[in-house]
Image (cartoon, rainbow, N blue to C red):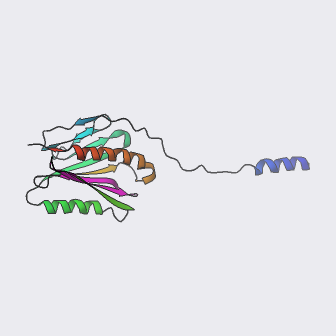
Amino acid sequence: MVCYATIGILCTSCQHFTPKPRSYFRIHLAEKTYKRSDSTLSYSFEYPNNIAYIKPNPKDTAWFDIVYPLYNARIYFSYKQIKGNFQEIAEDSRTFVYKHAFKADAIVENPFIDSTQQVYGMMYEIKGNTASSVQFLVTDSTKHFLRGALYFDNHPNKDSLAPVISYISEDIRHIIETTRWEP
């Protein structure tokens, strides 16, 4: 009788629940091929056409999105023509970025200057669990002002989204570097 009780206690005492650490899905990051966007607008750029597509805005032809269906992400683009109001437009853009400051761990500004093509830009990397992880602007400072913001269609989690944010940030840098103003 004691033998059965001892075996029973040993068997039940060895079973304990150990929760597994939280993990995230493995994300496949595809090789990219870039294509120049439609030049019917006053600007064009190269975007990764094998993993994303341009979705026009039916209400405003100068506004559009680049959609990444595999990553549940979207870059919202807006365009404004500068008519002597560059400072106002630039400050609105900066204010929009810094609205995320209360949730951000840091905001890193990365400037871009290509004076031969008259392309000047700023890419803002917004660190932390914020609604938008990357925002940017591209301008010639006299006629054109293009702005973009990366959003995901799910709850922000900097740890699980980090590889995709880095992956799409490369595309945003490429968009800024390849922007050209059409005559």
Q: Residue at position x 82%, y 48% from top?
A: 8
Residue 165 appears left or right of 182 = right
Query: Viewer-proximal residue, 167 or 101?
Result: 167
Residue 122 appears left or right of 60 = right
Place of residue 85 in the rendered image (x, y in percent of width and height, measured from the top left): 11, 61
Place of residue 149 in the rendered image (x, y in percent of width and height, measured from the top left): 28, 52
Number of marks: 0
Q: Residue at position x 8%, y 60% from top?
A: 84
Residue 179 appears left or right of 156 = left
Q: Splitting the image into 4 quarters, where does residue 104 fall?
A: bottom left
Residue at the right extreme, as displayed: 1
Query: Viewer-proximal residue, 177 or 75?
Result: 177
Place of residue 127 in the rendered image (x, y in percent of width and height, measured from the top left): 38, 57
Q: Residue at position x 20%, y 38% from top?
A: 37
Q: Residue at position x 14%, y 49% from top?
A: 118
Position above or below: 180 against 108 = above
Q: Is residue 73 visible?
A: no
Residue at the front extreme, as displayed: 116
Residue 136 on the magenta span: yes
- Secondary structure, magenta segment, majority class: strand
Residue at the bottom extreme, as displayed: 102
Place of residue 175 in the rendered image (x, y in percent of width and height, measured from the top left): 25, 44
Q: Splitting the image into 4 quarters, where does residue 125 fall?
A: bottom left
Residue 174 appears left or right of 130 = left
Quarter of the image where the C terminus is located: top left
Residue 29 on the magenta span: no
Query: Viewer-proximal residue, 60 or 147?
Result: 147
Q: Is residue 35 visible?
A: yes
Q: Which residues are magenta?
A: 113-139
